[in-house]
């Protein structure tokens, strides 16, 4: 091979490597869980001179549907109003904004845990009312808290706040000790909310097939598929611009597959949906524990908030036990969608009979177990962006 040709080939090779390197940098292949969108995870304790605003740094790290972060806070002196930011909705995926209110409940749980640690006692009024289909995008008050000085407490669940992440990867088959499940159950249940764990192989298989079937129904519904996809973020630029949504790093695929997915062009909607269905069937419905959160009436706003608080508490406690967790709420999403469309539904009764609880209905389904790999944090908007004047 002549020298000129070798130089040309060498130059082309370098150009390809350079382009690949640029793409890797541009798409954030080497910056998993880093950058401005992840800063709130480092600043989660806030500062002592912030007064009643300090616990809000912990509130915004809560679980919430599709990482829409559908919350706003109005803090005035000793009072904090928590609002559901109805504009940040999942459309037909959450037609009654029920999941949105669960997410707000998750934030309220973190807020209350942090406030108690920073030396406040609290009076809380949670708003009641019926969740209706496709409501206006105007924010609605979900709860109002009044904080008063009190002796500060220590709380291991508070300390778990920055370590709690939704884990969508494979879990081990290792069972979870019954005593641990009983502790979690006691912590998350009260007169408004019940938690049911399924550990028996047959019950888990039945619930798994319900979750897979519901996922199939969702991806066959073009509106649901589209409304969900609006909250997917793939490259670094998108993540840092929006600081919300579901990204590749938290999708449950291995680090290597995640790097490849970032380098390649984005999947078209049909392929992305199929990938989700395959992940649900082959990975995410396999766990030693599947579970449900039940309430008396899933479309009562206060019950949705209470269920969210229960999930956040359960996930924080699971984190302290070294357990991973993932909501898998497709069956209840289908219950809502069927009701909105006036269609027959068999998911609600299927979940109810698995739970063996006739006077209760499922509002949230999940899995629990020991993860093979740790989960990555999801992005968050800065606190300033979710503070408003009026509550
Ligand atoms: C009401 C509700 C429903 C959710 N449904 C699902 C789900 O069906 N599948 C899933 O993988 N994660 C689900 N999640 C988890 C969120 O996507 C996750 O909390 C959010 O992306 C923030 O990530 P983090 O929990 O790791 O902080 C749900 C969370 C909430 C509160």
Image (spheres, rainbow, N blue to C red):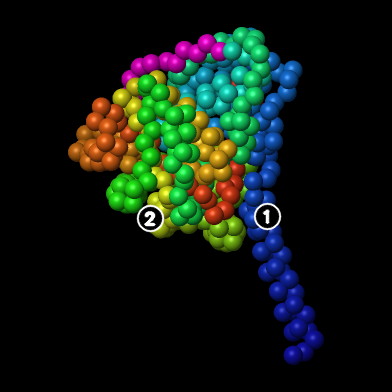
> Which corner quadrant holds the N terminus?
bottom right
What are the residue bounds of the magenta stretch? 122-133
One can see residue 96 in this view: no
Label 1 and label 2: CA atoms lie apart by 29 Å
Up-down: is 136 above or below 268? above
**Residue beneath the point at 75% across and 74% down:** 11
**Residue beneath the point at 59% across and 61% down:** 256
Ligand 1 closer than 8 Å to the CB at disc 2?
Answer: no
Q: Nearer the viewer, residue 364 or 217?
A: 364
Horizontal relation, residue 115 to residue 183: left or right: right
Up-down: is 264 above or below 338? below
| Residue position marked by numbered label 1 in the rendering | 30
In this view, the residue farthest toward the front is 179
Instruction: Locate residue 59, reporting x and y percent.
Output: 58, 27
Instruction: Locate residue 46, reporting x and y percent.
Output: 70, 26
Give the mark toward the camera: 1 or 2.
Answer: 2
| Residue position marked by numbered label 2 in the rendering | 281
Question: Is disc 1 placed on a helix, strand or loop?
Answer: loop
């Amino acid at each position: 091979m002549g020298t000129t040709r070798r130089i040309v080939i060498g130059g082309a090779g370098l150009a390809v490597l350079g382009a690949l390197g640029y793409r890797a940098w541009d798409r954030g292949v080497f910056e998993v869980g880093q950058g401005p969108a992840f800063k709130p995870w480092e600043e989660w304790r806030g500062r002592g001179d912030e007064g009643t605003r300090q616990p809000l740094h912990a509130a915004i790290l809560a679980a919430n549907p599709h990482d829409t972060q559908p919350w706003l806070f109005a803090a005035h002196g000793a009072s904090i109003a928590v609002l559901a930011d109805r504009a940040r909705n999942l459309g037909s995926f959450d037609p009654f904004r029920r999941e949105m209110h669960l997410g707000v409940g998750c934030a309220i749980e973190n807020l209350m845990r942090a406030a108690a640690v920073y030396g406040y006692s609290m009076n809380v009024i949670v708003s009641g009312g019926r969740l209706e289909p496709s409501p206006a995008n105007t924010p609605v008050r979900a709860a109002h808290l009044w904080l008063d000085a009190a002796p500060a407490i220590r709380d291991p669940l508070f300390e778990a706040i920055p370590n709690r992440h939704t884990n969508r990867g494979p879990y081990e088959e290792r069972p979870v000790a019954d005593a641990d499940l009983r502790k979690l159950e006691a912590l998350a249940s009260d007169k408004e909310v019940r938690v049911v764990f399924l550990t028996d192989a047959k019950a888990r298989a039945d619930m798994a097939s319900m979750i897979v079937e519901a996922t199939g129904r969702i991806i066959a519904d073009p509106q649901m598929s589209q409304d969900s996809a609006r909250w997917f973020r793939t490259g670094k630029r998108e993540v840092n611009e929006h600081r919300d949504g579901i990204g590749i790093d938290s999708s449950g695929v291995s680090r290597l597959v995640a790097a490849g997915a970032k380098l390649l062009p984005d999947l078209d909607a049909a392929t992305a949906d199929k990938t989700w269905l395959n992940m649900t069937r082959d990975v995410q419905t396999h766990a030693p524990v599947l579970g449900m959160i039940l309430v008396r009436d899933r479309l009562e706003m206060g019950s949705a908030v209470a269920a969210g608080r229960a999930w956040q508490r359960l996930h924080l406690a699971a984190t302290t036990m070294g357990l991973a967790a993932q909501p898998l709420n497709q069956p209840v999403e289908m219950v809502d969608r069927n009701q909105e469309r006036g269609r027959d539904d068999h998911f609600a009764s299927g979940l109810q009979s698995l739970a063996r609880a006739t006077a209760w209905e499922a509002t949230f389904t999940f899995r629990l177990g020991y993860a093979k790999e740790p989960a990555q944090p999801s992005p968050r908007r800065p606190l300033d962006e979710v503070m408003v004047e009026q509550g």
